[in-house]
Image (cartoon, rainbow, N blue to C red):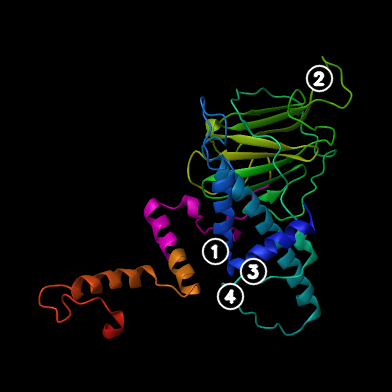
Amino acid sequence: MGTDRDEIFLHILREEKNINNFLDAFFGFLYRCTDFYVESNSEQKLGFPSGVAEKLVLSSMYKWKNIASTLQKTISSVEDSTLNNSSSVSHSNQLTLTDNKNCSLTPPVVQEIEIDSCTESTDVNLPLAESLKIDHVSDSYNGAIRDNYVWTQTLNDLDVLVKIPEHIKTSKDTIKVNISSDEIKIDVKPLNSLANCEWDNIFDGKLSFKIRKDESIWSIEPGKHINIHLEKATERWWEALIIDEPKIDLSKIDCSKHFDDMMPEEQMKVQKLMWNQQQKLLGKSTSEQIKMEAILKQAWNAKGSPFQGTPYDPTILK
């Protein structure tokens, strides 16, 4: 997917005027033309298992958010080293279209999605950290970059990218992923190996805290990495993914609460604020204005009203 797709997206964005309408158009397209919102089960094979669609969206969003954050840090570092006086920066809710050549970058397509039904694993060889150096362009979000893996977290879940050898093109018969409530183990079949040969272990670690094993999901990007999504057993920030790795400084992470982590009442308030903001951008009435209009219409024909029996005319009230 290259710059030709960017031109299409830019055209849609210009037509929709703002980011809210653009996202609404995109997710509306998925609703009308795909089975993105269909939940699969034992009888329904189309669509995704419950919760997977949301996780795919968040995974892509966080990936590009991390890339943008890293790029901004790099730019800021260069500016700080060359300028004695920092210039003021204004922030806006409006989305700005750029001619940045990097806008052609797009997230990779997930090739496979598997719901893991793992059993407890046994101790095996140490990870091949030296031979599998991570090739990851972005900083981690509330996590860390290690020799052969990157991990990120929110208050309720974790995402782990584990580097795999280039010859691993599919999960079938070439990779084993075992996830328990407190451990992850990944083995891969060596290149040009025999049927009965020993497998290479590329990841084996005890998790810092327990996770919900049955909620674990993993997917593979052939020849690059495994993407593992884990649900935390309890709401808390982790200082490390596995117990043997260095701990991160929790005082420096982004502790803001994400939309999916909010209570239903909080989500409704956020959605109301977003809807009102969109109405203002379009020059339309907000929820409070619509509510007031309904009250005025009711009072217009109320008993004793001087306007009772006449057509409602808001210009008179204004």
The outermost residue toward the right is 192
- Label for residue 20? 1
Nearest to N terminus: mark 3 or mark 4: 3
Residue that numbered label 3 is attached to:
14
Q: Of marks 3 and 1, which one's residue comes earlier in the chain? A: 3
Is the residue under label 4 in contact with that under label 3 (CB below 8 Å)?
Answer: no
Q: Nearer the viewer, mark 2 or mark 1?
A: 1
Q: Residues within 10 Å of mark 2 (few under 14, many from 20)?
A: few
Secondary structure of the residue carrying tag 2 is: loop
Q: Residues within 10 Å of mark 3 (few under 14, many from 20)?
A: few
Compared across the picture, whether 63 is left or right of 163 comes to left
Q: CA distance from mark 3 to mark 4?
A: 17 Å
Do tag 3 and tag 1 residues touch (Cβ < 8 Å)?
no
Q: CA distance from mark 2 to mark 1?
A: 52 Å
- Dot 2 amino acid type: Glu
The reply to whether residue 234 is visible in this rendering is: yes
The quadrant where residue 67 appears: bottom right
Q: Nearer the viewer, mark 2 or mark 4?
A: 4
Residue neighbourhood size for the residue with mark 1, other residues' Cα within 10 Å, grouped as few (<14), some (14–19), many (≥20): some
Looking at this view, name the residue that lies furthest to the left: 304
Residue topped by disc 2: 198
Query: Which secondary structure, mark 1?
Result: helix
Choose between 156 and 106: the one closer to the eye. 106
**In the figure, is residue 232 to the left or right of 246?**
left
Amino acid at dot 1: Asn
